[in-house]
Amino acid sequence: MALLVVSLVAVPLIVGRITYDASLTRLNDAAMASAQTRALALDSILDRQRAVAVVLSVDQQVIATLRDVTPADDAVSAKLDLLREETQSSVVYLINAQGRAVAASNWDQPTSFLGYDYAFRDYFRQAMQYGTGQEYALGTVSRRPGLYLAHDIRDNGRPIGVIVVKIEFDTLESAWARDPDHTHVLDAEGTVVISSTPTLRFKPLPQQSGFLTTKAALRRSDWTLVVRTPHSGAQRLAGLAAGTAFLVVLLGGIATALVTARLRRAARIARAQAAYRDDLERAVAARTRDLSDEMRERQTAEQRLIRLQSDLVQANKLATLGQITAGVAHELNQPLATIRLLAENGTHLLPPQPARDNLSRIVAMTDRIATITQRLRSFSRKATGAVQAVPLDQSIQASLMLTASRRRASAMRFNLPRLPPNLCVRAESVRLEQILVNLLTNAHDAQEGHPDPWIRLRVDQTAQDVTLTITDNGPGIAPDMATQIFTPFATDKPQGMGLGLVISRDIARDFGGELDLLPPEPNQGASFRLTIPRAL
């Protein structure tokens, strides 16, 4: 009897705890994925609006308005309104150097910003002093909260005004509010600026028990996205599991007592007792199958976790391999220099003959090895993040050298047009080579085992942009994969991580450009188009 009482208390507690921990693990995985997805979506919105400010900062009509070359008429405001509608921003307006709005996308609305003085705004002062500004605040005219992104406008290197893009997040907050998770965005001081609970805006995020908290940092910003997932689902599952365990233990105890009692009875009830045992065994077997199903689900979750850990270990291995490669390239330079010096001395000491020719070949080969190691060291060097004029031909040649072994191993043809040496783009050399190496490596992988492999690179240029189109002769990309090719962890490679193209597109957008997949064409594989601003 004492054992039954102990079992009725201990077994439900243990089963409930195990179920609760497993549910929390699943909730944590789902919350992490949700936080990353929402952070990427918000990053995309902010990047698009920053691009609007950058484009307008060099618009000649806008600059002419601030120069007073043309009067501040409705044409500029109408242009800002059209751009606002296309980019889904809230308001776009132009401020002169004195802080007064001279054009606005809401010029024909009762709440127009035209004529208002915004010199007191932090985003205006930041943009005039540092080139860009950002502030989350209530509008002085609309009284609606929003994020203000500002970019200075220069004339001959002198700031003459500021273009401002205001973003309101009502639609995003409404979408978050329909989810059971609570989503908030905090600034550097921990103040809520965007929230699925609008009443928390401009306040510190309060402590809240019974929730699992997951955070994700936003790019190019000191904001943090926080997702709070309620524990109630895990608690409910744990309660159901504990209750089930309690019933099983209770039924088992009762069954044991009945079996013991009936064994003491006369043989006349033996057949009924056997039938009862059969029924009990079937019930236990059914419950065992249920527990087995739960165990299989847990094993599946553990296997997913192991795969994720393996991917992270592989990424760490690749980073370490890059460091080792840079070190080996550095260490090879000294013996190569010694070999070259000795070979050159030999060519001068020996008369013209085959031995001297061989020494000349050794000198040429050391030059080639030195060039390769220099390219490896440059590629493995950490990017500085400084965007500047980069010769396009040099970056393409460096990327071709880093992938040359793959191309020679498969006898792959490469079609590259002659590029002018003075054609430069606005980029950062290491990260630009990272994009090109990733695209070339993907083209190589796609044509592995394919007859007559080739890669074609086409370069088009305008006064503002340079476009590179990389096409291969592989099987192309499946339609279902093409729709998610730039989604994190989406890949059709057995050993791929699904991050190369995502990172490459982010780098291209940081340059002010774009990376996209072109529609398939007959008799060719995949085509990727990389657009980068031209360095003027």
Image (cartoon, helix red, strand yellow):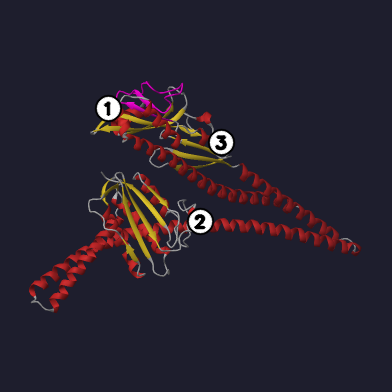
- Residue 103 is a magenta residue: yes
Task: Name the residue tied to disc 1.
Answer: 67
For residue 263, say whether it is visible: no
Instruction: From the image, state whether disc 1 or disc 3 is nearer to you.
Output: 1
Q: Is residue 265 left or right of 360 when viewed as pictured?
A: right
Q: Which residue is mark 3?
A: 177
Q: Mark 2 is on which residue type?
A: Pro
Q: Is residue 101 in view from this perspective?
A: yes
Mark closest to the chain's N terminus, 1 or 3: 1
Q: Residue furthest right?
A: 268
Q: Residues within 10 Å of mark 3 (few under 14, many from 20)?
A: some
How far apart are the two marked residues, 3 and 2, measured between alpha carbons?
33 Å
Residue 199 lies within the magenta run:
no
Q: Do the residues bearing badges 2 and 1 touch, measured as CB atoms within 8 Å?
A: no
Alpha carbon separation for disc pair 1 and 3 = 46 Å
* Residue 492 drawn at (x, y percent): 48, 59
Residue on which the image places disc 2: 479
Q: What SS does tag 3 mark?
A: helix
Q: 254 or 430, which is in the foreground?
A: 430
* 59 left or right, relative to 313: left
Judged from the image, the secondary structure of the residue bearing numbered disc 1 is helix
Give the amino acid type for the residue marked by disc 3 in the picture.
Ala
Indicate left or right for 251 with 446 as reference.
right
Q: Position of residue 259 (x, y in %)?
A: 82, 59
Q: CA distance from mark 2 to mark 1?
A: 51 Å
Q: In the rendered structure, which segment of residues is drawn in magenta?
A: 91-120
User: Residue 153, position in %: x, y?
Assistant: 30, 32
Three-letter code for the amino acid on which mark 1 is drawn: Arg
Q: Quadrant of the C terminus?
A: top left
